[in-house]
Structures are given as C-alpha cells and as structure tokens.
Image (spheres, rainbow, N blue to C red):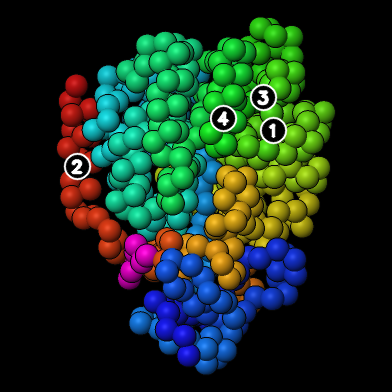
Amino acid sequence: MVEVDYVVYGDYLLTMASGPMVDGDNVILNGSVAVKGGKILAAGPYSEINERFIAKKVIGGPGKVVLPGLINTHTHAAMVYFRGLADDLPLKEWLECFIWPAENKWLSTEFCADAVSLACLEMLKSGVTTYNDMYFFQDGCARVVKEMGMRAVLGVGVLDFPSVSAKTTAEYLANAEEFLHKWKGDDLVTPCVSPHAPYTCSTETFRKAKALAEKYDVPLHTHLSETRYEVNTIKERYGKTPIEYLEEIGFLDSRLVAAHCVWVEDNEIEILARRGVGVSHCVESNLKLASGISPVVKMLKEGVKVTFGTDGAASNNDLDIFTEMAIAARLHKAISDDPTVLSARQTLAMATRDGAGVLGLADKVGTLVSGKSADLVVADLNKPHLTPFYDIYSLIVYSMRASDVDTVMVGGQVVVENRKCLTADEGAIMEKAWWWKNRIAGA
C-alpha cells in the first residue's frame, strides 16, 4: 500500500471531470480521493482507494459530499471593508459619489492587505478556493493570500486617471509589470493585468496592457458592457459597442476574463465565442445595482465560456458563490421561460471546472482527478434544509449554503476544518475589520 497524506471521502464524490460527468453519470457513491504532496493521486470508490492507500489522516466521512473548490472569477476582494457603505444606487452614482472617494481616502498597502485577509476568510469558509481579483496594492494582498493558503489570480488595476495607487497610466502599467515580474511562477498566486473598463482606459492603454500580459504570459481581466451608460459612452466615443470596439483594437482573446457582459447583442456574443473570451456572470451585483441581466443562456448556446463571480462585497454584498449559483439558475429559467436551462449540473460545472478553464488553471484545479492540485471542499449533508434529497447536483445548487461547508483543502493543505480556519486567527481578522470600519465611519 502507498502511504499518502490524506484520504478524503464522503457519501458522494463529484469529480466534475469532463466527458460523461457532464451528464452526471459517474458521480462516485461512497467516493474518495488520495492526496499526497499537494496532488491528487487517485479518485474513486472508497473501497478501492482504501485497498491501495494508507493515509496519515482521513477527512470527511458519512453524511458528507466532496467536490472541487468553488472558483470566483470576478471580485475586488479588498472592498469587503466597504460592505454596505453605499447601497440602493445605480452604478455610476455609486462609483463616482461614494466608492471612488472612499478608495482615494483609505486605500493603502496596509488597508488592502488587512481587507483581503477578511475576504479570504469569508471565501474559504464558503468553499471558494480560488478567486480572480482586480484591485490595487496587490503585492501586500498576494502575501496575505499565501499566508492563508488560498489560490488567487491577482490583477493589478490600470486606469487613465490618477488614484492613490498611481498618478499616471505609465505608473499603473509599471506597477503591473513589477508585480508580474515578482509573482510569475508562484504556486498559489497568478499575476494578472487588469485595465479597468473601456470607459476608463484608452485604446493605447488597452493595447499596452495586452502587450504586457502577452510578454509575461498571464491573464487579462476587465469590466465589459456592464451598463447602458457604458455602452452609450463607448458608442459616442468610438462609434461601436464596447465589444465591437475591443475586437477592432485586437484586445479580445482567450486569456481575457470579461466581467458582467450584460448589454451585449447577438453579433457580440458571436465575437466573444470566436475569440474564446471567458465571461464572469455577477448576477447578484448586476441585480442589486439594476445594471441588467446578462444573456447567459444565449452566450452558453453559442459556446461562450460563462462562469460565476461575486463582484466586490460593496455591491453584492457578500463573496458567496453558492448564492450566485442559486440565483442565476433560477433567474435564467424565468426570463427564458424555460425551466430546463442552466441545469444544476451545468451550473456547478460553471462554478468549478469552467471557472478554472477561463483563468488558465484547468491543468491545476477545477476537477478532482489524478494529477490535479488537491483543491477541494467537504460539505455536511446532515442538515434539515438538505434532508431528504434525490439528486446531489440539485441539492448543492438549489439548497446548499455556504455555512454547510465543513472542510476546505487548497494544494493539499487543510485550511478550514470543522468550519474553523486553520491558517489565520479569525478573531484577529474580525477585530481588525471593525477597527477599520470605525475609522471609516468616523471620518
């Protein structure tokens, strides 16, 4: 028998592997995974794994489900400290009158690092093992991500107007390149270039951002077609919609994750599909800001890779992918007048396997198969709201809550066990969050 670090098992094992798994035919009952050196050595029925491997520690057990870690493909993690700062407003007013002034007053390396510790704590305890971020002062954030044992794609924000992080576009880009150079090749942190949006970045800025991403072979991340205001602004400025404009300047390709994509036409969906652009659907933020509803069903039918993001906690107001799945799966049935769209199986794939794919991490995470990193979640099924059930996918998407997550592993390291974070002092993180809140509220 081969000695391994962990055997993780449950009544159900969802590998989310492609092929037959798309139809749910090979959900493994009484399944388990063997983990050694941060990697999955094997996944299969517990009886088979138990015959082949002996574990230093066994995780999970009866009444549990094991699934890949959830992936949040668009957020601004440090904005957790602005949770509830300004609500019930349209995006333009929310940004210009409240969020941007608050950011200019408070953002710093210390602020962002402290805030990201809270964001990571929230996400890890809700089963999110990887997140894709767009913000500032990312070097300090990266150190926190590493300390907490999370996985992240951290995009350095680029703008064409000054902020506390940079005074000129050249300085934003220089900051981005410094970050790329420092963090490229890290096991947990993937650096990224994040021009903010077509209405805040010029053509030259987009081109320079893409050239930088290509130079270091890293992802790109931007906001795209989020509001009517954005679409009308870009039409007035360039005579084209935002997607048509970015296509014309050669910005769109498969390394790009485009957040929102709410106001898109059929021809633009074809462009996104042809260019292999990944889309992050942020349904809660879009609903709360009344930005609109993304045509997700149309995009999926045309082959666009759609995943789930929470956006920042200042506009959501949480970082919970379970609620994103639950709302999106229901909402799109209603607006499509078709209860078969966004099935539970497809929805969970969007939150795991497909999320890894659009971030360029499909070779590492997103499925529980031999050779992948052991990024996984164990959830507790012994809850009244989860009893009884007939389909495990349906249960996860329509009934499960973040609070049902029991244990979380990232890269073979147990970071949450019995709902307690093992890599950080939860009390200290919460205390620091209240300290910052009191400073902000008292200013």
Q: Which mark is residue 251?
A: 3
If you read the primary sequence from the N terminus, does the residue marked by circle 4 or circle 1 appear first?
4
- The answer for how far apart the CA atoms under marks 1 and 2 are is 40 Å
Please name the residue shown 57% across and 89% down the image.
Answer: 48
Q: Is residue 420 visible?
A: yes
Q: Is residue 222 above or below residue 379?
A: above
Q: Disc 3, disc 1: CB below 8 Å?
A: yes
Quadrant hosting residue 202: top right
Q: Residues within 10 Å of mark 2 (few under 14, many from 20)?
A: some
Q: Disc 2, disc 3: CB below 8 Å?
A: no
If you read the primary sequence from the N terminus, does the residue marked by circle 2 or circle 3 appear first?
3
Q: Disc 1, disc 2: CB below 8 Å?
A: no
Q: Is residue 341 above or below residue 405?
A: above
According to the picture, the residue beneath numbered tag 1 turns out to be 253
According to the picture, the residue beneath numbered tag 4 turns out to be 215
Q: Is residue 257 above or below residue 360?
A: above
Q: Position of residue 129 (x, y in %)?
A: 45, 55
User: Mark 2 or mark 3, which is nearer to you?
Assistant: 3
According to the picture, the residue beneath numbered tag 2 turns out to be 432
If you read the primary sequence from the N terminus, does the residue marked by circle 3 or circle 4 appear first?
4
Secondary structure of the residue carrying tag 1 is: loop
41 relative position to 410: left or right: right
Main secondary structure of the magenta stretch: strand
Q: Position of residue 387 (x, y in %)?
A: 52, 76
Question: In the image, what residue type sits under mark 4?
Answer: Lys
Please name the residue shown 51% across and 56% down the image.
Answer: 70
Please name the residue shown 59% across and 69% down the image.
Answer: 369
Q: Which residues are magenta?
A: 413-419
If you read the primary sequence from the N terminus, does the residue marked by circle 1 or circle 2 appear first?
1
